[in-house]
Amino acid sequence: MRQTAQAAWEAGALIKQPLLTRCEKYAAFTLPTICTPPGYTEQSQELQTDFQSVGAQSVNNLANKLMLALFAPSRPFFRLDIPTDLAQKLGINQDDLAGALSLAEKRAVRRLDQMGVRPKLYEAMKHLIITGNCLLMLGKKGSVPMRVLGLKRYNVKRSMSGKVIEIVIHEKVRFDELESDVQKHLKDEHPQRYGAMDPMEPDTCGEVSYFKWIRWDGVQNYLVSTHVDDCELGDAFKAKYTEDTLPYRALTWELHDDNNYGTGLVEQCSGDFAALSALSEAEVTGAILASEFRWLVNPAGMTKATDLEESENGAALPGVKDDIIPLISGTGANMQFIDTVATKYVNRLGRTFLLGSSVIRNAERVTAEEVRLQAQELETSLGGVYSRLAIDFQLPISYWLIKMEGVELGGTALEPTVITGLDALSRNADLENLKACLQDMAIIAGMSPQAQFVLKMDAIATAIFAGRGVDASQFVKSEEEQQAELANQQQMALAQQVARPVAAAVTSGGASA
């Protein structure tokens, strides 16, 4: 019998349950709303928060840093490239082409802000950091631009190489919340089940299970079908996408071989979070105990307990000094020890999540260069994550943005290229490399004429630009261009020499007249 989307969802959800249990714990350490516990409803329950807020602060801080690195509002995060040989064949000037492509990049990224999807990207980043997984749904023109689904609302199956071969999306919605064409199809095809449900009368509309089933055909396309409960909708609700154009993107923070789901950064630090949580709870309990005290009254003494309770401030009481002594817990020293150990865990987590207070050492004199180097060292540790996010996150969004601009790249030689690794932290990396090349060339130019005479300047320039990863053909003149320019300079100098006596003769002749 043919498997239904509902059966596929139930089978996948059963396998995924242990992962969900762990992710609920990781969310409790940081942001509980990312993966809520079973049975949670926002109307009747308050999310259980941890005894520390370092987790929430760490996740929010790293998510903000990643957003600025990957989707900076001041510059495009991808570059449109066209093969050089093709541009030369078409007779297009490289500078003009670069300017036109740069304008197209900026327009596409401006669309990102116009659609207001940055909050969704920020939400996706928090899902990835905490649970290691999320599903990005890229919309069409005229519809909801983007949706982000947490781990509880989709199943994914991957091949041994990590390629997505199946996604099942499950959402519980009311019948009147379905699209109008879906409602009409269900009422027409299944009148006994859905015929009595009238969107104009919400009381008649019950809750249904809405499924999207995405499967790889094993060749080059993803096939998407829509299901409501155990009913598959017709061909009008089916779609076919290539790997580049698929609008359903199962993202991961870190994906290991043979795994269907990714691992988040919080899971990698779960031991530190658990220890900090226990220490924070102990510190709170110890502070409560330290703030409480009682009076110990000698029953054989002259002072009575009632005298102490009923007396006012400054009143005189009968008794001796040792009749009444304060009874306190004496946990102050222990709290100091707890605070010292907890600070170590805070610093460790701060370094992992790039918290500025943990990056910079605690000293009176800290140079700006030291701050920059320490921050760069920590951000280098996320270079692998940047590379994965560039492939799985940024590249599909770049294709999507270009398509939203009404440009179809299929059949063209244009391809978006995303800067990965540390270069993703700054789109000005190419400019910085060019500046470094010019500085190196300035050092060569400052050498003595005798040293320059024995050096092959063209070979040195080529080596410097190649070493910095800059295309020398764009900035270094070829030997033919140098000879042509030299010949032009010589011709101009010769013309000036010929014109000088003529000008002098004309001037002297005018003066004698």
Image: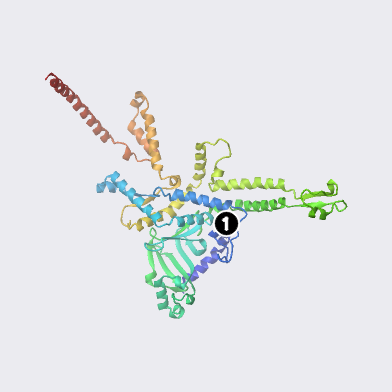
Q: How many marks?
A: 1
Residue 44 location, x and y as percent?
58, 66
State the residue lying farthest toward the right.
300
In the displayed orientation, state which residue is furthest to the top. Answer: 512
Element type at mark 1: helix
- Image-based side of 425 in relation to 98, left or right: right
Q: Which residue bears the numbered disc 1?
A: 26
Q: Position of residue 291 (x, y in %)?
A: 71, 51
Answer with the quarter of the image where residue 117 lies: bottom left
Q: Is residue 183 above or below residue 244?
A: below
Residue 147: x and y in percent read 45, 61
| Residue in the picture at 50% in, 45% down | 379
State whether residue 255 appears in this view.
no
Tell me the amino acid under the disc marked 1: Tyr
Is disc 1 surrounded by few (<14), some (14 to 19) or many (20+) residues within 10 Å?
A: many
Q: Looking at the image, which is closer to me, 372 or 14?
A: 372
Left-right relation of 103 to 319: left
Image color mode: rainbow
Asked whether residue 431 is in view, the answer is: yes
* Screen quadrant of the C terminus: top left
State the residue at coordinates (52%, 54%): 129
- Check the image and name the residue furthest to the bottom: 192
Q: Residue at x 55, y 51 (%)?
A: 57
Q: Quadrant of residue 25?
A: bottom right
x and y, in percent, of residue 237 in the image = 39, 70
Q: Nearer the viewer, residue 314 or 56?
A: 314
